[in-house]
Amino acid sequence: MKESLLFTPCKIGPLTLRNRTIRAAAFEGMCAGNSPTDLLYDYHRSVARGGIGMTTLAYASVTRNGLSFPHQLWLRPEIVPGLRRITDAIHAEGAAAGIQIGHCGNMSHRGICGCTPLSASSGFNIYSPTFVRGLRKNEIPGIAKAFGTAVKLAREAGFDAVEVHAGHGYLISQFLSPYTNRRRDEYGGSLENRMRFMKICMQEAMEAAGSDMAVLVKTNMRDGFRGGLEIDDCIEVARNLEACGAHALVLSGGFVSRAPMYVMRGQMPIRTLTYYMKQLWLKAGVKMAGRWMIPSVPFREAYFYEDALQFRKALKLPLVYVGGLVSREKIDMVLDSGFECVAMARALINEPDFVNRMKERGELRCGCEHTNYCIARMYSVEMACHRHLQGLPKCLQHEIERITARR
């Protein structure tokens, strides 16, 4: 029987992980006032204690105008001490600490980001919903420079790695995709031009990272809908990220403003989603149109695996597989196929100590049923697995039971 690679060390740029597991950068919703909280500290410490190789704080905006949510991290100097408290706790448990940095682009509202939401091109984002303004050419270098500043702040806060978010339909992805980029200058048109913004962001990030921080990039393998990027284009994007010096790519897919469940798979529990919403107008709109706006995409374990194999053949740099891993069997399958690391999110929301349990007991499956309660909840309050909560309203319990029964 072939020996498993799972609990062998893994090198990503200047960083060596104690094993090949990463807590994926899934939004926690634990940052009231755009700052780290005890809740964020407790969660990431528990994942580090649970045996993970690296845990990644999610979706830290590089600027205020890149914020999607009022309970999302905004990486700025005044929160560095709070972040240092978290990284110290992670390191004390033997894990590495990463932080995802990005800009949401058109996925926001004026009341959150402080301006008309920005994008590659002007238009209307029905998924926010809001009018959006295309970035002026003279504004682009400043946004790119903010990525470099964010990396410097991450180093000051004690992080070992940053993950640049270039997927899922956020700002870098909005420049890459022809669906959202209709520019007629050197940042639009051909794929080469649409990659220009990504490249200058990467230049700033890599220069700031220097020789002592690892830089990973989350990138799409497909946008997940007709009219978006397909796999051949995304492989070309990945090759350019490799040429930019990225130490590893996290392979994902989907576009939150067009194909949201392509990222996560399964069904969005609409009743749960609206139950926690505070804006009455938004709650009413999602109740009426949610099933149409957020169609289900069937879930199966390791749902990105076949696409990821094509990237493994095309690229030489380390690759991190993410997408539907809930069992030791599939994790070993992915690692045996040449991927350096595996990343998990929902499995570790369900069981923060899943990695240690795999190490201690061998063949295992975590208890996550992929009802997506945690996803629906995190847009308004902190993420949590329904199994960890008491007193859940009966209407939400019934929705979870219905979704579970259909799977």
Image (cartoon, grey):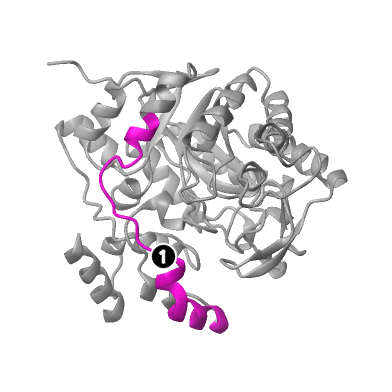
Identify the image quadrant of the C terminus.
bottom left
Quarter-of-image position of residue 161: top right
Closest to the observer, 350 or 266:
266
What is the x, y in percent for residue 251?
Answer: 45, 35
Badge 1 crowding class, 10 Å Cα cut-off, few under 14, some 14 to 19, many 20 or more, is many
What amino acid is labelled 1 in the image?
Answer: Ala
Identify the image quadrant of the N terminus.
top left
Residue most extreme to the left: 1
Closest to the observer, 88 or 296:
296
**Residue at the image point whose x is 47% and y is 51% from the top:** 225
Residue 306 painted magenta: yes
Magenta-colored span: 280-308
Residue 307 painted magenta: yes
What is the x, y in percent for residue 190?
Answer: 69, 36
Compared to residue 267, the image places residue 316 above or below, namely above
| Left or right of 177 on screen, residue 354 | left
What is the x, y in percent for residue 258?
Answer: 52, 58
Name the residue beneath numbered marker 1: 376
Residue most extreme to the right: 138
What is the x, y in percent for residue 89?
Answer: 48, 39
Residue 21, visible in the rendered structure = no
Quarter-of-image position of residue 99: top right
| Left or right of 289 on screen, residue 32 | right
| Left or right of 405 on screen, residue 274 | right
Residue 258, visible in the rendered structure = yes
Compared to residue 223, the image places residue 398 above or below, namely below
